[in-house]
Amino acid sequence: MPYGLFVLSYALSVGASWYLSSTGSAAADARAHSEFEGDSLQTRRQIQAGLNSYYEVVRAGAVLLSADNEINGAEFRRFVAGLQLRERYPGLEGIGFAQCVSGRGLRRLLRAIDLDGNRVTVWPEARRNQHCPTLFLEPVDDRNSAALGF
């Protein structure tokens, strides 16, 4: 009889412990899941807001080009300076403009760019039916200067 009571009380203790730990664990899991969902939704909204601001920069460039489809280097520099890229868009390395021309029109385009005061060398050198060299890339730094003409 004492051994039977011992086994019974032991079994009840183990069962009660298991029940309490599983219900407490389920509540903690539900709470953690709810917090995760809330945090992930907030993070998603922050990322979306950041992406939307960068999208607006691209949109502003498109509006600039639709207003005047012949843009020169000085106009482009003023436009980018007004955007305040470094201060307002820290993840944006630069904003540029590339123009596609036929293989025959490339010389004429480069001459027009040179007359504007911007020296651009197209690279890599190869004969193509169409070239789309980067003509303007602001703000001017070593990385952006290296990409001109590509």
Image: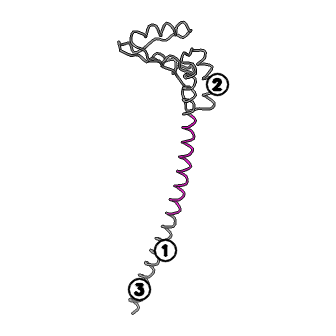
Q: Which mark is residue 20?
A: 1
Image-quadrant location for residue 6: bottom left
Where is 123 relative to 50, above or below? above
Q: Of helix, strand and loop, which one carries label 2?
A: helix
Q: Disc 1 and disc 3: Cα gap in Å? A: 18 Å
Q: Of helix, strand and loop, which one carries label 3?
A: helix
The foreground one among 94 and 71 is: 71
| Residue type at numbered disc 2 | Gly
Q: Disc 2 and disc 3: Cα gap in Å? A: 80 Å
Q: Nearer the viewer, mark 1 or mark 2?
A: 2
The foreground one among 49 and 28 is: 49
Residue drawn at (59%, 32%), measured in percent from left and top? 89
Q: Which residue is mark 2?
A: 82
Q: Which residue is mark 3?
A: 8
Image coords of residue 107 (percent x, y): 44, 7
**Which residues are drawn in magenta?**
30-53
Where is 108 relative to 87, above or below? above
| Label 3 crowd (10 A; few <14 / some 14-19 / many >=20) | few
Residue drawn at (56%, 38%), measured in percent from left and top? 50
Q: Earlier in the sequence, mark 2 or mark 3?
A: 3
Q: Earlier in the sequence, mark 1 or mark 3?
A: 3
Q: How many marks?
A: 3
Q: Earlier in the sequence, mark 1 or mark 2?
A: 1
Quadrant into which the N terminus falls: bottom left
Check residue 99 for magenta coloring. no
Q: Residue furthest front?
A: 67
